[in-house]
Image: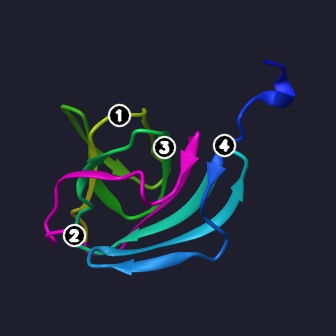
Amino acid sequence: MSVSDKPRAAVRYAPGDGETRPWGSWEVLAIGEGYAVKRIVVNPDQRLSLQYHHHRSERWTIVAGTGEVQVDEELFVVQRGDHVHIPILARHRLRNHGDEPLVLVEVQMGEVVDEADIVRLSDDYGR
């Protein structure tokens, strides 16, 4: 297979896409072949579902607030300026344990980049 025959990565976001969720909100800032960049806001005392992805890895950069991250069995505290790498298939979750919104920039990279690639293992909101 030549480079030109390689299957193209599927990105199913558009800049400006976003949603309000029970824990906060997300918005797509940029997309390209095989990647998407999102701004995620987690409200105080809220957390994302414990989840993993089949088709993408993620890199988080914390830009405001403080929280706790779980990646597989590891737990650690994060604050502004910290970076987190989440490999494909790693179970992960983020919790805002501060009094202010926790804001991060998330770079998703993979063969399929969209909201359908979320497998929830545990969720505070019954999704």
Answer few, some or many: residues within 10 Å of disc 1's Cα (few below 14, many 20 plus, some between 14 and 19): some
* Residue beneath disc 4: 9
* Residue beneath disc 2: 46
User: What residue appears at the point 41 percent right and 51 percent down from the top-left corner?
Assistant: 117
Residue type at the position of mark 1: Leu
Task: Tell me the CA gap for discs 3 and 4.
Answer: 15 Å
Task: Tell me the CA gap for discs 2 and 3.
Answer: 20 Å
From the image, state whether disc 3 or disc 1 is nearer to you: 1
Instruction: Identify the disc placed on residue 22.
Output: none
* Residue beneath disc 1: 89
The percent position of residue 30, horizontal first and vertical second, equals 69, 62
* Residue beneath disc 3: 58
From the image, state whether disc 1 or disc 2 is nearer to you: 1
Instruction: Please say if 44 is above or below 2.
Output: below
Residue type at the position of mark 2: Gln
Q: Which of marks 1 and 4 is nearer the N terminus?
A: 4
Q: Earlier in the sequence, mark 2 or mark 3?
A: 2
Q: Which of marks 2 and 4 is nearer the N terminus?
A: 4
Task: Tell me the CA gap for discs 3 and 1.
Answer: 11 Å
The segment highlighted magenta reads 99-127
